[in-house]
Image (cartoon, helix red, strand yellow):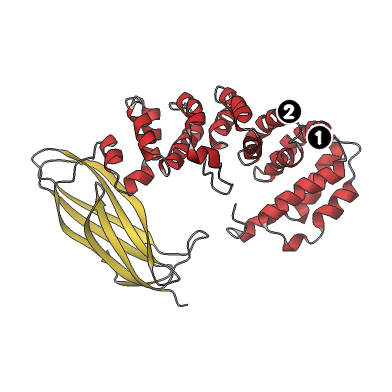
Amino acid sequence: MDDESAPALKNWFDEARFRSVAGELAKVHTGFDRKRFLKVALAGLEELSLMQRLRRMTFAAHEGMELEFLEAVEVLKELAPKIDHSFVTLFLPDYVASYGQENFDESMEALKFFTPFGSSEFAVREFLKMDLKRGLRFMRTWSKDEDEHVRRLSCEGCRPRLPWSFRLEVLVRDPEPVMPILDRLKADRSLYVRKSVANHLNDITKDHPTRVIEILRGWDWSNAHSAWIAKRALRTLIKAGDREALALMGAGEMAKVKVGAFRVEPRQIKLGEAVAMEAKIQSTSEQTQKLVIDYAVHYVKKSGGTSAKVFKWKELMLGAGEVLVLRKNQRIQNFTTRVHHAGWHGVELLINGEKLAADGFTLNVEG
């Protein structure tokens, strides 16, 4: 996770939180050294970022418990349901990743136990990095588990490009070892799991697009769960106008349409204000056709150049000769993942992957 992405979130690990966890640890472990824990935990706390505070909780717990790893895990299992914040519970799998690498099998079982309380997706990657085959044996079993959190862990933890974590380069190069997991979960009843499967496949499209398309061609698209995963998995390829991905969506042919108008208003805005987009599209086809309509905003970079980001707009069936008018507002404001810069922002209308119209607006970022 980017430590600068959300500075206020570090207060999830404030002094009150450390004292609360210390109190709960003292209840489940009579030998717990509360003074030692707090001395370690609170030293220079204000200067620490979110993830540094999480790691501090891990280290302070280790210092306060003064137990061998397997004994410590049993104490932390009793502690887990007493923590009332799912993100804070991430220090539990972090403890396993930090101190359990000499106890591989026991650590994997501990990660399975802790994942319903928050998630073990980051910690499990340390063990996959150590021994991929051994780790994936556990995760294939997890993919059959009754608990949706465990099934999700089997998929999310081995994503090749998991956000806020290091890449699993061996799986970036060759994703085949995880395919049995993805195949088992391709129609999972849990939306939580399906989102993970879709994101995992979307990761793979960035390095092996043809392989993902080949896999999805073999799926049963009449199954609503599988179709949902497939569409979401193809999103990066769709935004890039990949013809094979569009074909899977039923929009592989170039759109037979005429864009009567495409406007972005107002022409000048200040940071925090919104632009309104309107597109008038008329079918020139004698048959109903599938349209995948997106738009791209060319954001100005600090260097003065631009970088395009594609947004979904609409998927629909357009009848022969039919006229469609679409409207959409988008507020232009800073996020933790994007800081805006002044200048002309081009906006393109994309239909079935093809740029068919363009307009734009000028952004003023001065206060």
Q: Distance between the residues labelled 1 and 2?
A: 10 Å
| Front in this rendered view, residue 26 or 55 | 55
- Amino acid residing under circle 1: Phe
Q: Is residue 359 toward the left or the right of residue 88 in the image?
A: left
Which picture quadrant has residue 207?
Answer: top left
Whichever of labels 1 and 2 marks the residue nearer the N terminus, that label is 1
Residue at 30%, 65% in the rendered image? 346
**CB of mark 1 within 8 Å of CB of mark 2?**
yes
| Front in this rendered view, residue 62 or 214 | 214
- Amino acid residing under circle 2: Glu
Mark on residue 106?
Answer: 2
The relative height of residue 25 versus residue 134 in the rendered view (above or below) is below
- Image x and y of residue 208, in percent: 41, 39
The relative height of residue 348 versus residue 86 in the rendered view (above or below) is below
The relative height of residue 287 versus residue 331 in the rendered view (above or below) is above
| Front in this rendered view, residue 80 or 109 | 109
- Image x and y of residue 349, in percent: 25, 56
Residue at 69%, 56% in the rendered image? 11
Q: Is residue 224 toward the left or the right of residue 131 in the image?
A: left
- Image x and y of residue 33, in percent: 90, 44
Query: Tag 1: Cα neighbours inside 10 Å, few (<14), some, or many (≥20)?
Result: some
Residue at 72%, 35% in the rendered image? 81
Mark on residue 69?
Answer: 1
Q: Is residue 366 toward the left or the right of residue 21 in the image?
A: left
Query: Tag 2: Cα neighbours inside 10 Å, few (<14), some, or many (≥20)?
Result: some
Say which element carries label 2. Answer: helix
The answer to whether residue 20 shows anywhere in this view is: no
| Front in this rendered view, residue 213 or 40 | 213
